[in-house]
Amino acid sequence: MKTLLIAGGGKFSKKALHFAKKNHYATILIDNDPNCIASKIINTHFQELKLLLANFDRNSQNSIVFFENNIIIINELLKKIKFEWIIPVIPLHLTALIVKNFLSSCNIELVPDGKRCITATKRINPALLLDSLLQENILYLSYAKQNEVCPDNCAGPSQYCPNFDREKPITLTNYLKKIFNVSNNINLSQERREVNIVLHSYQLLPGLGGLKGGEIEEVLAKINKHLDLLRKNNFRLLIATSCNCHGVVNFYKIA
């Protein structure tokens, strides 16, 4: 049976739940707020991981449960359940959180890499650089400008933005993969002591993107394969998630 994980229970979770019901996914929605919008829509609630795993019916169409817990527990869910889709509807970079959590569980801690963030800022096309939070070592890229707001039902076409009448010669995912030398989802360079990760957020509905669970699993498996190498050589990590139009990039180094 198809399984789906929704990270966040705010107003945007309603569209994710609609996608889950429409496509008959066995679904877990996680949020630590018992009074969030999603908690009032979903009838079955769990607070403990063991109880959730024991009672979550992966073989039941339209089985949707609310897991009241901190999003940091997401890696424990990924260990136990193979999700087809993971839909982030929270104001944080979920891919970066998952990778950091995984490395932390392997006794490898990441800290911000300000030097590489500044270097990358100079490489990126200024027309695509929406914002640079250098103190947090995060870059935001977009085909939209600072004063432009995309509609909630945008389909995110790959070559042209009808909202702002703008050509898009390359999707942001492909742009990031090109400038950071990522041929698939992850590239590890021993020579440069770098791990570059770029995951694509796929359009599931207009205004709703999702990560493929299999691609996240692939990234974590490759990192796991090279843990000793990362430890011994103090690798730097770039972690990016993007769709056709928007992207976020975090820069880290091993502490």
Image: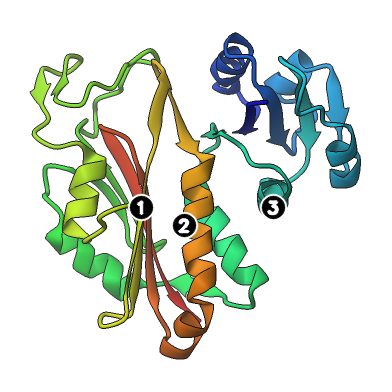
**What distance separates the C-alpha of mark 1 from that of mark 2?**
7 Å
Badge 3 amino acid: Lys
Looking at the image, residue 82 lies above or below residue 198: above
| Residue at x 55% of width, y 63% of height | 100
Give the SS element for disc 1. loop
* Callout 1–callout 3 Cβ contact below 8 Å: no
Instruction: Point out residue 150 in the picture as x, y percentages from the top left corner.
Output: 30, 21
Label 2: which residue? Answer: 219
Amino acid on which the number 2 mark rests in the picture:
Val
N-terminal of the pair, mark 1 or mark 2, is 1
What residue does disc 3 label?
Answer: 79
Residue 171 got which mark?
none
- Pick the residue in front: 31 or 19: 19
Pointer 3 or 2: first along the chain: 3
The answer to whether mark 1 and mark 2 are in CB contact below 8 A is yes
User: Residue at horizontal 45%, vertical 83%?
Assistant: 229
Badge number at residue 185: 1
- Separation of marks 3 and 2 at Cα, in angstroms: 14 Å
Q: Nearer the viewer, residue 39 or 58?
A: 58
* Residue 22 drawn at (x, y percent): 58, 9
Is residue 104 visible to us here? yes
Mark 1 crowd level (few <14, some 14–19, many ≥20, 10 Å Cα): some
